[in-house]
Image (cartoon, rainbow, N blue to C red):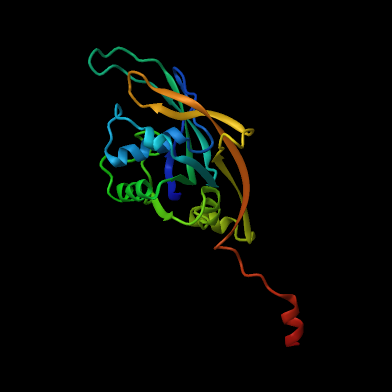
Amino acid sequence: MSVLLMRLAGPLQSWGASSRFSRRSTEAAPTKSGVIGLLAAALGRQRTDDLADLAALRFGVRTDQRGVLLRDFQTAHHFATGDAQPISDRYYLADAVFVAGVEGDAGLIDDLLAALRCPVFLPYLGRRSCPPARPLEIDTDHEHALEQALQDVPWQAAPWHQRRRRHDQQIDLEILVEATPAEGGGDSLRDQPLSFDPLHRRYALRGVRRIPVSVPNPAALPVHDPTSLLEGA
């Protein structure tokens, strides 16, 4: 199996898994349905197309920069009639950065990497109003499993955020990875896509495991060895 690694960074992101009616919430990390939708768009697939091959990919995400929860109070009017539409609260993650990965057959993974580099439809981070700020693709990993591939990626937080943590040599992060049926346990989230058809969207539950990891901080201040001062005296 191979892994495609993606950088999800932008001024705003929104990854809803349980939004209903006038309240459009966001999860704290990208959802599988949102990332699979992004990949399907890059491939040029229509919402009514079969997505079984993409839904079968195993998904994981690492939170590199949590960002700040932002609430947007929205009003709207119908374009044709001018009638007022329901007032809504929409939530976003501002200045967040994530590393997402999908694991599957090497051929499909390579096709997805090519699609991200030259997408058919414009990719966005959960909602159309949330374009990515940096290139999405990081690389492919044809040697390691999803968990290891996500752990090995260098810290992708913004430079200003890395400098803010300059006194920390190592940064503690968290990986949310799709649990296999044999593993069981963990959390569950209804973001397993079954259909993106606007007339009949369907999502199933999937298991999620949390894995703590530690990565080096490339902006960390040098560590001074006190013994070197004694040797030079």
Query: In the depicted view, which residue is nearer to us: 88 or 4?
Result: 4
Q: Residue at x 33, y 41 (%)?
A: 123
- The answer to whether residue 122 shows anywhere in this view is no
Query: In the depicted view, which residue is nearer to us: 186 or 222?
Result: 186
Q: Residue at x 46, y 30 (%)?
A: 192
Residue farthest toward the left in the current orientation of the protein: 80
- Residue 112 vs 76, above or below: the answer is below
- Residue 62 vs 153, above or below: the answer is above
Position of 147 with respect to 37 (left or right) is right
- The answer to whether residue 220 shows anywhere in this view is yes
Q: Residue 159: give x, y in percent of width and height.
A: 49, 57
Rendered-image quadrant of the C terminus: bottom right
- Residue 66 vs 126, above or below: the answer is below
Q: Residue 195: give x, y in percent of width and height.
A: 37, 26
Q: Residue at x 52, y 42 (%)?
A: 67
Q: Residue 5: give x, y in percent of width and height.
A: 44, 50
Position of 70 with respect to 167 (left or right) is left
Query: In the depicted view, which residue is nearer to us: 45 or 106?
Result: 106
Q: Residue 69: give x, y in percent of width and height.
A: 52, 35
Query: In the depicted view, which residue is nearer to us: 157 or 107?
Result: 107
Q: Residue at x 33, y 13 (%)?
A: 84
